[in-house]
Image (cartoon, rainbow, N blue to C red):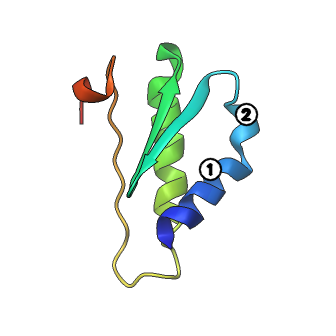
Amino acid sequence: GIIKTGMAAVWAEWGMWELWADPLLQIHDELIFEVEENVVEEFGGWVKEKLAGAGEGKMVVPVGSKYGYGPSWGEIEK
């Protein structure tokens, strides 16, 4: 599926982030990471780009992705 393709794209370049971010969970179509506060925006944009590219050439309609952040999962700003 598309989420698996997106995850593979993220993991393929994971080495550049392994000091600042840790993957925590995948729940259906959501990926949850613990990320150092000083790289949240950059990391979120990078993951969003990787996930958006997962549907290229496979879907007629572009696949959207978004990210949010917060001190806990229940307080994520979307």
Q: Is residue 50 above or below residue 78?
A: below
Q: Residue 48 appears at what percent x and percent y?
A: 46, 48
Identify the residue position indicated by label 2 in the image: 16
Mark pair 1, 2: CA separation: 10 Å
Which kind of residue does numbered mark 1 sit on?
Val
Name the N-terminal-most of marks 1 and 2.
1
Locate residue 22 relative to residue 55 in the image: left or right. right
> Which residue, as the protein is rendered here, is positioned at the far right?
15
Q: Can you tell which quarter of the image residue 22 is in?
A: top right
Which kind of residue does numbered mark 2 sit on?
Met
In contact (CB < 8 Å): disc 1 and disc 2: no
Mark 2 secondary-structure assignment: helix
Q: Is residue 14 above or below residue 5?
A: above
State the residue at coordinates (51%, 45%).
47
Numbered badge on residue 10: 1
State the residue at coordinates (72%, 46%).
13
Mark 1 secondary-structure assignment: helix
Nearer to the camera, 35 or 23: 23
Circle 1 packing at 10 Å, graded few (<14), some (14-19), many (20+), is some
Q: Residue 18 appears at what percent x and percent y?
A: 70, 29
Nearer to the camera, 53 or 19: 19
Nearer to the camera, 26 or 68: 26
Instruction: Give the position of the C terminus as an image quadrant.
Output: top left
State the residue at coordinates (46%, 25%).
40
Q: Residue 49 appears at what percent x and percent y?
A: 50, 52
Circle 2 packing at 10 Å, graded few (<14), some (14-19), many (20+), is few
